[in-house]
Image (cartoon, rainbow, N blue to C red):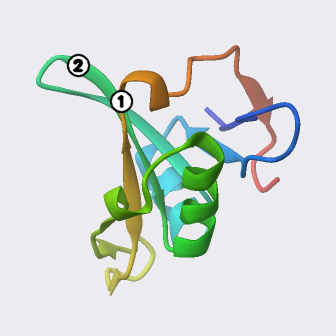
């Protein structure tokens, strides 16, 4: 499947993130400085990680939705294209910070 683009807020004040059908595609997007929303379950609870190598973009997202900056987590991640670890950060999104599931819009590959 292709990428799924999701708008955080319709007013354009919150940075946009993308969800992907394939984890590798999301990781590459995050390695290129995009905001990748990766949904999963932890101990039976719904949550997501919002991941990027662009710390400033993640902080802008956090400010827009009310996340405290000190909760942004640093974790180097392996770039699937090169196998090399790169500096990356993520938010743990749970509860009111977890974006709702929306009807997906398919985006052509490479868009």
Reply above or below: 8 against 16: above
Q: Residues within 10 Å of mark 1 (few under 14, many from 20)?
A: few
Q: Position of residue 77 (x, y in %)?
A: 31, 71
Please give the residue where the numbered disc 2 appears in the rendered image: 45
Please give the residue where the numbered disc 1 appears in the rendered image: 94
Please tell me whether mark 1 sits on a helix, a strand or a loop. Answer: loop
The answer to which image quadrant residue 88 occupies is: bottom left
Q: Viewer-proximal residue, 60 or 79?
A: 60
Marked residue nearer the N-terminal end (2 or 1): 2
Which residue is found at the position 16% from the left and 17% from the top? 44
Residue sitting at the far left: 43
Q: Position of residue 107 (x, y in %)?
A: 79, 38
Real-space CA distance between mark 2 and mark 1, rounded to the nearest whole angstrom: 8 Å
Which residue is found at the position 56% from the left and 18% from the top? 100
The answer to which image quadrant residue 46 occupies is: top left
Please tell me whether mark 2 sits on a helix, a strand or a loop. Answer: strand
Reply above or below: 22 against 46: below
Which quadrant: the N terminus?
A: top right
**Left or right of 79: which side holds 7?**
right
Cβ atoms at labels 2 and 1 below 8 Å apart? yes
Which residue is found at the position 54% from the left and 51% from the top? 36
Q: Position of residue 17 (x, y in %)?
A: 65, 46
Q: Is residue 55 visible?
A: yes
Q: Position of residue 29 (x, y in %)?
A: 58, 61
Reply above or below: 102 against 38: above
Pair 2/1: label in front: 1
Q: Viewer-proximal residue, 31 or 48?
A: 48
Q: Is residue 54 visible?
A: no
Which residue is found at the position 29% from the left and 76% from the top? 76
């Amino acid at each position: 499947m292709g990428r799924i683009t999701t708008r955080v807020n319709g007013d354009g004040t919150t940075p946009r993130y993308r969800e992907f059908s394939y984890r590798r595609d999301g990781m590459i997007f995050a390695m290129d400085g995009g905001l990748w929303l990766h949904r999963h379950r932890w101990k039976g609870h719904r949550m997501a990680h919002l991941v990027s190598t662009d710390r400033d973009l993640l902080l802008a997202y956090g400010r827009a939705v009310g996340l405290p900056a000190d909760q942004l987590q640093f974790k180097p991640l392996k770039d699937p294209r090169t196998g090399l670890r790169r500096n990356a950060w993520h938010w743990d999104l749970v509860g009111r910070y977890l974006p709702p599931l929306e009807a997906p819009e398919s985006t052509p590959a490479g868009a």
